[in-house]
Image (cartoon, rainbow, N blue to C red):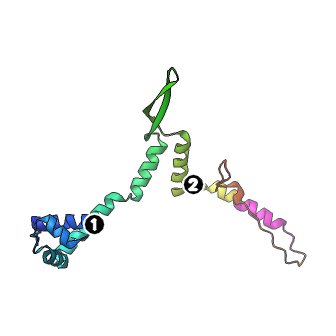
Amino acid sequence: MKLSIKQKRFIDEYIITGNASEAARRAGYSVKTANRMGAENLSKPVIQRALADRLKELDSKKTADVKEVLEFLTSTLRGEITDENIVVEGVGDGMSEARRMETRVASKDRLKAAKLLLKRYPRQLDEDEQVARIKKLASEAGKLDTSNDTDDVIIVDDWSEVGEDAEGET
């Protein structure tokens, strides 16, 4: 079933006001019948579906999806994004003027975007590095003295070398 123009307007006005009677009045229903028509419209399955679809459409426009976030981070990393900055310059006689200036994002922001992207695409260790780590762990495990019967636990940590950046973050 196709919606009438009034029903379409009712849906839009209901989204704005959240009030069925007010939405009916704004959509063009008479003041006398607006209360009844608003309630009746909300009970119709076709209007309920259209209202749900419209709300879903509005929601999707307001919320970024994963693809959009990754595209933004990539644009930032590549320096394609600009910031608007206020610059104050002296004009003489102790006076200054402020003006707006567009600049590319700072290198620190580009680096942050790179880090955020790399978190989503972790670096895969190459086979040689994995073999080297296994050999190192095997050698350290072989050095452990198991002859005494103490309950001491020795923890071998090889992650301290991997994944740390200059700030010590993993």
Q: Amino acid at mark 1?
A: Leu
Say whether residue 13 is left or right of residue 122: left
Percent of width and height locating residue 68:
39, 54
The residue lying toward the viewer, choosing from 50 and 145, is 50
**Which residue occupies the foreground of this view, 7 or 126?**
7
- Sequence-first tag of 1 and 2: 1
Q: Main secondary structure of the magenta part?
A: helix
Asked if the stretch drawn in magenta spans residue 8, the answer is no
Quadrant containing the N terminus is bottom left
Task: Give the structural element (helix, strand or loop) at label 2.
Answer: loop
Residue at the disc numbered 2: 123
Q: Quadrant of residue 146?
A: bottom right
Q: Secondary structure at mark 1?
A: helix
Q: Where is mark 1, residue-wise?
A: 55
**Position of residue 76 in the picture relative to residue 13 (left or right):** right
Residue at 51 percent across and 57 percent down: it is 120
Q: Residue furthest right?
A: 148
Where 109 falls versus 55 (above or below)? Answer: above
Residue 137 sits in quarter: bottom right
Residue 36 horizontal/vertical position (percent): 14, 78
| 10 Å crowding of disc 1: few (<14), some (14-19), many (20+) | some
**In this orientation, does residue 117 appear?**
yes
- The answer to whether residue 136 is magenta is yes
Q: Is residue 20 above or below residue 132?
A: below
Q: Residue at x 65, y 58 (%)?
A: 130
Distance (Cα) linking label 1 and label 2: 40 Å
Which residue occupies the extreme top position in the image? Answer: 93
Give x and y (percent) for residue 170. 64, 56
Magenta segment range? 133-146
Amino acid type assigned to the residue bearing label 2 in the image = Arg
